[in-house]
Amino acid sequence: MKQGLFISLEGPDGCGKSTQITFMEQYLKQEGYEVVVTREPGGTDISEQIRKVILDKDNMAMGDTTELLLYAAARAQLVSEFIKPAVDAGKVVICDRFVDSSAVYQGIARGLGIDMVYAVNSYALQGMMPKRTFLLDLPAQEGIKRKRGQHELDRMELQKAEFHEKVAQGYRTLAAMHKERIVIIDAMKPADEIAAIIREELQDLL
Ligand code: TMP
């Protein structure tokens, strides 16, 4: 049976993940792989409902621990309902964000600690971790500027500049801790150049 593959994309808000996911999906399908795309928080009916609660800007009073647990709850449902079955069936799963987002946003930027994030998430992951993670690295304020031009900002995007700065820096720290898995790409490069870098990495992987 064909072996499944789990890949994730990460980066600060506005780093251009969606554009790259479209390129990746097209490329992998052309190469004959069965590809499914999903996102976090979300990707299943239940997880999308949790997403609404997390990102609702009327929920500014949400505590950091509640936030951590809601992301983990959305993830638990996505892993058991979608990611694990798809990988077990031999598909390529591309996920827009995964537990690295919790490590950076909740663990580093909120200050809850990476160990705490992994301890909580160990219940959700069922041993699933991406084989390769593409990190689109971008100066924090550039990402928020891009988002402002696209839509009304959500609860996370509305966090202070200092928070977004910690996120951008936090991703670099995490990438240095997991050099074998996380590939850092400069997200200020043109989209087609980024796509070419990712394609080369995928060729090595497959
Ligand atoms: P998105 O806009 O890329 O869909 O992500 C939603 C927001 O949630 C984004 O600001 C990043 C944040 N986030 C976390 O803080 N922790 C997590 O575990 C995940 C998956 C996302």
Image (cartoon, rainbow, N blue to C red):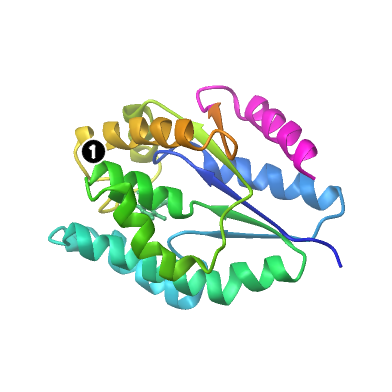
> How many numbered circles are shown?
1
Left or right side of 161 for 94: right
x%, y% of residue 56?
26, 62
What residue sits 28% from the left and 31% below the top?
A: 165
Amino acid beneath label 1: Phe
x%, y% of residue 106?
29, 50
**Quadrant including the N terminus:** bottom right
| Quarter location, residue 34 | bottom right
Considering only vertical position in the picture, is 185 above or below 36? above
Q: Which residue is situated farthest in the left direction here?
A: 61
Q: Is residue 153 visible?
A: no
Considering only vertical position in the picture, is 118 above or below 137? below
Magenta segment, principal secondary structure?
helix
Q: Check disc 1 and report its element: helix, strand or loop.
A: helix
x%, y% of residue 198?
68, 34
The residue closer to the viewer here, 24 or 91, is 91
Considering only vertical position in the picture, is 204 above or below 63? above
**Residue wearing tag 1:** 163
What residue sits 17% from the left and 62% below the top?
A: 62
